Structure formats: structure tokens, C-alpha cells
Image (cartoon, rainbow, N blue to C red):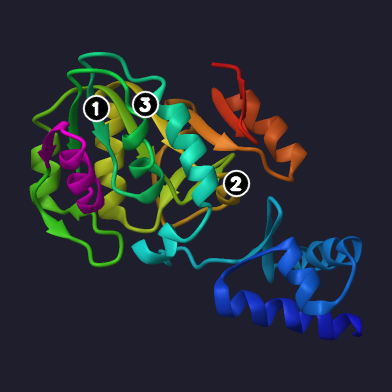
């Protein structure tokens, strides 16, 4: 297969499924891993794709947001690892804000602390929190069909009535300059207020979010501890460690500078 044919094959697969692992691209093209890595570097330099740990993804538009179903199918192992790590920071009697999203939902099964109170704007968080017998409060407002998050005036007014020991927030982008961001300004407002009203804040984001910038900023990187996974971009990771406190999950081993 010629170079341009491999590139077209890679782009067609990514158009179909948004994210592809290196092994999938090798199988699809019949090329070696080293060849595919070079192809991905070329395509990334041409701003056609984004390299992520172990594969590649399509570049996203600033206001583009994956649906809940898409999120549930992506990086499931990494989310479980980050959820377990995040749960380790929760102490008996803590009041928590748990943001809408699948990364934050992964925290719930690992919470061992007693007498925990949860406030959430996530429709997906509510059912699991109740099933696990957590005392749970829900923000009002409009429920988004895509992310199942409560947003809008009702949610903003409701969250302002609370103060939290800890907040656990999801993000669509982790950028060295722009900070944490999400495609929807209304969701960004809820995330911003949750961080502002918490004694300690944690953002959960796998390394595929590194370098991404979406439409609405909700916090600077240094406003929260970042719970994440290792990526392929060592230079980005080195700069990130200079800005933010990290909790990095890697193959069941935890590196920490917290």
C-alpha cells in the first residue's frame, strides 16, 4: 500500500469511529507499527488528526461534544483507574460535587468513605449514587440530551447554595495556555462554580485530552489537581508537571507528585 493510500485508509477509519488504536491501524493497512507511527506524525503535522496514547483521533471542532454513548465506549479501563484513584481522596463525612460525565461516574463504585454527601448535575450520576446508597442532592435546570447534564439558570442558582469539601470535574480539553475547557458555556459555568465553591478540586482527564482546546474555558490548570494517564508527548507532559499537581495512573501503578 502506497503512503497516500495508507493515509486515506487511516483517515477513513477515524471518520468512521473517531478514535483508533495503533493495532487497528496496523491491521487495517498491513503496515508495520513504525510505519504507522511515522504516518500519524505526518498527519498530525498536517493538522488532520491528533495523536493520542496508543493511537490517534480525529481533530474536534471547538463546540463539538461526544454523546454519552460515545463517552461510555471510550477509554473505559483508564476511566476505572482514574476513578479508583480519585475515590482515594474522599474521606468520611465529605461533601462532594461530582460533575456529569463518564470519567466522574467511574469514581462512585470505589468510594469506601462513610457518611458521604453527593451533589451532582449529572443524570448518569444520580441513579448510580442512589443505588450505592449515597445521600444525593441534584441540581435543577435543563437536561442536555447529549451529555445528560443539568445546566442553565436553575442549575446555576442551585449550586450557589452549596459549599463542598471536594469537587470532581470532567473536561474536554487540557491545554497549557487555555487551561481546562468544555464545548458548552453553560456546562463551563457549573464546573467553574463547583471549583470555586470547593476546598479541594480534582479534574479527571485521560491523556487524549492533552493539548485540546474547546469552546469554553472553566478553570486554569493550577486551580485543580489533575488525575490523568500518561501520554505519548513527553514534552507536553514535562511542561504540564511544572504547572499543575498531577496524579498519573499507568498500568495499575500510580505515580504521584501530590
Q: Which residues are magenta?
A: 122-138
| Residue 152 seen in this snapshot | yes
| Between discs 1 and 3, the one toward the N terminus | 1
Q: Secondary structure at mark 3?
A: strand
Q: Residues within 10 Å of mark 2 (few under 14, many from 20)?
A: many
In the displayed structure image, the side of residue 10 where residue 107 appears, left or right: left
Residue in the picture at 43% in, 59% down:
71
Q: How many marks?
A: 3
Residue 100 position (above or below residue 68): above
Q: Secondary structure at mark 2?
A: loop
Q: Quadrant of the C terminus?
A: top right
| Between discs 2 and 3, the one toward the N terminus | 3
Q: Are marks 1 and 2 in contact (CB under 8 Å)?
A: no
Residue in the picture at 90% in, 60% down:
34
Residue 73 position (above or below residue 131): below
Residue in the picture at 41% in, 21% down:
88
| Residue 179 seen in this snapshot | no
Q: Are marks 1 and 3 in contact (CB under 8 Å)?
A: no
The disc placed on residue 210 is: 2
Residue under pointer 3: 201
Q: Quadrant of residue 96?
A: top left
Residue in the picture at 59% in, 32% down:
249
Q: Secondary structure at mark 1?
A: strand
| Between discs 1 and 2, the one toward the N terminus | 1
The disc placed on residue 96 is: 1
Amino acid at each position: 500500500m502506497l503512503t497516500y493510500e495508507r493515509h486515506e485508509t487511516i483517515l477513513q477509519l477515524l471518520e468512521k469511529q473517531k478514535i483508533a488504536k495503533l493495532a487497528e491501524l496496523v491491521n487495517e493497512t498491513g503496515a508495520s507499527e513504525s510505519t504507522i507511527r511515522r504516518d500519524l506524525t505526518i498527519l498530525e503535522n498536517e493538522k488532520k488528526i491528533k495523536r493520542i496514547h496508543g493511537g490517534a483521533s480525529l481533530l474536534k471542532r471547538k463546540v463539538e461534544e461526544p454523546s454519552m454513548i460515545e463517552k461510555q465506549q471510550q477509554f473505559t479501563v483508564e476511566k476505572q483507574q482514574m476513578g479508583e484513584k480519585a475515590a482515594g481522596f474522599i474521606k468520611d463525612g465529605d461533601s462532594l460535587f461530582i460533575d456529569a460525565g463518564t470519567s466522574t461516574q467511574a469514581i462512585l463504585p470505589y468510594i469506601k468513605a462513610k457518611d458521604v454527601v453527593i451533589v451532582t448535575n449529572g443524570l448518569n450520576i444520580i441513579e448510580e449514587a442512589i443505588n450505592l446508597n449515597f445521600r444525593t442532592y441534584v441540581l435543577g435546570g435543563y437536561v442536555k440530551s447529549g451529555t445528560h447534564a443539568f445546566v442553565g439558570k436553575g442549575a446555576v442558582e442551585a449550586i450557589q447554595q452549596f459549599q463542598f469539601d471536594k469537587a470532581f470535574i470532567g473536561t474536554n480539553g487540557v491545554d497549557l495556555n487555555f487551561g481546562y475547557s468544555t464545548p458548552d458555556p453553560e456546562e463551563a459555568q457549573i464546573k467553574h462554580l463547583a471549583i470555586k465553591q470547593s476546598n479541594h478540586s480534582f479534574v479527571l482527564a485521560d491523556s487524549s485530552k492533552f493539548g485540546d482546546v474547546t469552546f469554553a474555558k472553566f478553570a486554569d490548570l493550577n486551580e485543580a489537581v489533575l488525575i490523568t494517564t500518561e501520554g505519548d508527548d513527553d514534552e507536553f507532559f514535562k511542561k504540564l508537571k511544572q504547572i499543575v499537581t498531577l496524579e498519573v495512573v499507568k498500568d495499575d501503578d500510580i505515580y504521584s507528585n501530590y
